[in-house]
Amino acid sequence: MREVAFIKQNKEKWLEFEQAIFGKSTKNPDELANLYIHLVNDLSYAQTFYPKSKTTVYLNYLASNIYQKIYKTKRLEKNKISYFFKQEVPLLCYQYRSYFLFAFVLFFAFLFIGIISTKYDETYARSFFGDEYVNTTLENIKKGNPVAIYKSSGEISSFLGITINNIKVGAKMYISGLTGGILTFYMLLQNSSMVGCFQYFFYQQGVLWQSIKGIWLHGSMEIFSMIIEAACGFILAASLFFPKTYSRTDSLKIGFGDSIKIYIATIPFTIAAGFIEGFITRWSKEMPLIMNIFIIAVTLSGISYYFLLYPKRVFQKVYKNSIHAS
């Protein structure tokens, strides 16, 4: 059967699935289970004959959501916080993985802009960080400790100030998705190019490696979280301007409900990054090299695994269980 005919034949049934999933019908568990069996059959057919089609992706999405709805009672018996971080958020991350890719591509593009701008414009770093910060950093470099500025205030005050500021920036970047993603795009441009400027500035001073050993102790989680938060803003923007088969209001509700959960999941990583920056980064020069590398590797691999690799494992597990349950 041609894909167009397959869609036309089953379109009404799939719309009924959507109504059941997103709360616009009052079907009991038995009716949902019956719908689910039909959906899995359609999904199996689509995977066989249209494996790379958007229809298959769409049916995968419906199957995952209706499976969660059927087993909601079982889910509520579990620890809600554990379920949120171990399954709900990873499934959403897998669903919106294309937005993550988009945000990462923009980050590296803007990072490159920051590097090039710093290379060819001597005033670029000062326009970002201000004369006082740049002059202080240059003095610290002369004294042999490029990241000594992290010792300029107490541990607790640094931790609290940095963490609160980073959470505010992340929240602003996320909610700015309501501008159609324009402000999210601008904030990502500003922050990403700042990272490129910052690192190239240290390269120009001949202390790039020393700066990496210090800054990326906390920077791996801080920057990674920022990129995910930008992706959440783009999800919000897409739900507002590209409602697909939903009304704009329903699309925004779904987009907001999904994206805010992913955003919330970044907050523990932002707090952890603030803790490292406030209490540990200041000692990066005195720290053994192996400890620097270990902390950077653990923090970067940990947040990368949670947002990029673990979601696929969770999706495959849920999908396998859903097929078995049918």
Image: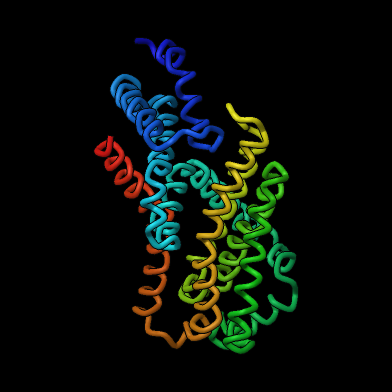
Q: Residue at x 60, y 66 (%)?
A: 198
Q: Residue at x 44, y 60 (%)?
A: 80
Res. 227 in view: no
Quarter of the figure with residue 294: bottom left
Quarter of the figure with residue 79: bottom left
Viewport quadrant of the C terminus: top left
Res. 262 in view: yes
Q: Residue at x 73, y 45 (%)?
A: 179
Residue 130 percent coordinates (x, y) = 74, 72
Image colouring: rainbow
Residues 170 and 208: in front is 170
| Left or right of residue 94, residue 270 in this image | right
| Left or right of residue 297, residue 207 in this image | right
- Total labels: the figure holds 0
Residue 131 percent coordinates (x, y) = 75, 75
Residue 311 percent coordinates (x, y) = 38, 50
Say above or below: 238 vs 40. Answer: below
Viewport quadrant of the N terminus: top left
Residue 69 percent coordinates (x, y) = 43, 42
| Left or right of residue 2, residue 97 in this image | right
Residues 180 and 134: in front is 180
| Left or right of residue 297, residue 248 in this image | right
Say above or below: 289 vs 184. Answer: below
Residues 321 and 180: in front is 321
Q: Residue at x 63, y 57 (%)?
A: 193
Say above or below: 269 vs 162. Answer: above
Residues 141 and 194: in front is 194
Quarter of the figure with residue 42: top left
